[in-house]
């Protein structure tokens, strides 16, 4: 009798797991654009793994010249080889970029502007959950997830405008809903929050994702009248390597949530939607999830005063003002 009950329980768990997988992976929305990108140039940060890599693979299949902007040259070169082999597109290259160094961001932008004549898509995809400080003394999560991308975007903005119509896609996260922007903490400690426990890092990650949304919102306002639009996206809960530096205990906890995760191909669909689908220009500055604009987003992600102050403080941090 006990064996029968165990078998029934196992069957129920398998059915539940299958239902969750179907809803979160199989049925997750797909980008419906069939656009070809021959003659177009794309930059994707953090494109050597995860959703950045699958985004690069898709855009390479469409004929784009794809630049993988990554820190780890070994992994990036391996990703380039794989993408070229899979897509037969030889216009896939690696350019060194360490978002934890403003000097590296400036060097990347200089090299790009000297070697490439156009930029049609900038996809700010890279993100991390690491403790520590950047080369310039900022909190690592704030420095990489927001500040490095902020500077990169501004340095490339003129080339985006000259290549228009063009787009900027910032990969955010639903984690922004638990975030806040403490401007006082930023001014005093050059970080979004204090503390380096795994829980505190997760909290700071949410703060950085709110920064992504506020940056997108403010950028859209400043781009009005140009031929450049921008969008922030939630890729879904995707199984990636972002938490690889967490403790074994946290990894054990995360392992129980993997049944709810999407694969990287599913996770890049909203990014592709905002990069490729026509007639969404009027939604510039908005936040998308499941290939759909979230028009009822929390007001803190569209706070004019905080967005403006974050922009101005970021300019100061980057030496732009």
Image (cartoon, rainbow, N blue to C red):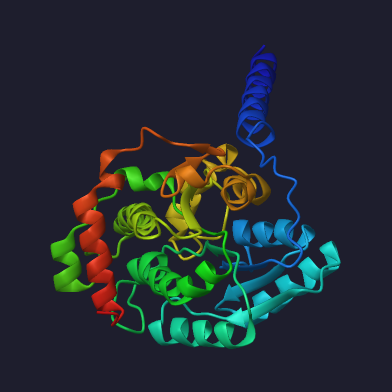
Q: Residue at x 37, y 52 (%)?
A: 213
Q: Is residue 284 above or below residue 18?
A: below
Q: Is residue 108 above or below residue 259?
A: below
Q: Position of residue 222 (x, y in %)?
A: 35, 60
Q: Residue at x 39, y 82 (%)?
A: 102
Q: Residue furthest front?
A: 225
Q: Position of residue 103 (x, y in %)?
A: 41, 87
- Give the mark count: 0
Q: Is residue 275 left or right of residue 316?
A: right
Q: Nearer the viewer, residue 195 or 237?
A: 237
Q: Position of residue 149 (x, y in %)?
A: 43, 69
Q: Position of residue 255 (x, y in %)?
A: 54, 47
Q: Is residue 317 left or right of residue 216?
A: left
Q: Residue furthest top?
A: 1
**Can residue 254 be spotted in the picture?**
yes
Q: Residue at x 47, y 43 (%)?
A: 282
Quarter of the rendering occupied by the C terminus: bottom left
Q: Nearer the viewer, residue 33 or 234?
A: 33
Quarter of the rendering occupied by the N terminus: top right
**Can residue 193 be spotted in the picture?**
no
Res 57 quadrant in image: bottom right
Q: Is residue 163 above or below residue 114?
A: above
Q: Is residue 46 left or right of residue 15?
A: left
Q: Nearer the viewer, residue 235 or 203?
A: 235
Q: Is residue 192 above or below residue 29?
A: below
């Amino acid at each position: 009798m006990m064996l029968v009950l165990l078998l029934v329980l196992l069957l129920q768990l398998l059915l539940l797991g299958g239902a969750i997988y179907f809803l979160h992976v199989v049925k997750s929305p797909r980008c419906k654009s069939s656009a070809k990108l021959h003659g177009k140039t794309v930059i994707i940060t953090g494109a050597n793994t995860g959703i950045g890599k699958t985004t690069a693979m898709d855009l390479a299949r469409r004929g784009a010249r794809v630049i993988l902007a990554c820190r780890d040259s070994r992994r990036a070169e391996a990703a380039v080889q794989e993408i070229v082999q899979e897509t037969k597109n030889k216009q896939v290259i690696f350019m060194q970029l360490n978002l934890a160094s403003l000097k590296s961001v400036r060097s990347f932008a200089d090299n790009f502007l000297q070697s490439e004549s156009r930029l049609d898509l900038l996809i700010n995809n890279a993100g991390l959950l690491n403790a520590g400080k950047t080369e310039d003394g900022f909190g690592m999560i704030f420095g990489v997830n927001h500040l490095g991308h902020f500077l990169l975007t501004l340095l490339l903005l003129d080339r985006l405008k000259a290549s228009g119509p063009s787009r900027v896609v910032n990969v955010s996260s639903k984690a922004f809903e638990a975030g806040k922007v403490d401007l006082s903490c930023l001014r005093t400690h050059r970080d979004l929050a204090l503390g380096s426990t795994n829980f505190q890092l997760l909290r700071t990650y949410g703060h950085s994702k709110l920064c992504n949304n506020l940056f997108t919102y403010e950028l859209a306002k400043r781009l009005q009248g140009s031929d450049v639009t921008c969008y922030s996206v939630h890729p879904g809960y995707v199984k990636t390597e972002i938490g690889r530096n967490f403790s074994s205990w946290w990894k054990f906890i995360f392992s129980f949530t993997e049944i709810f995760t999407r694969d990287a191909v599913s996770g890049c669909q909203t990014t592709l939607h905002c990069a490729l689908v026509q007639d969404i220009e009027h939604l510039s500055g908005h936040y998308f999830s499941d290939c759909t604009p979230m028009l009822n987003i929390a007001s803190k992600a569209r706070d004019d005063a905080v967005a403006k102050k974050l922009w101005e403080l970021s300019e100061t941090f980057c030496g732009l003002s």
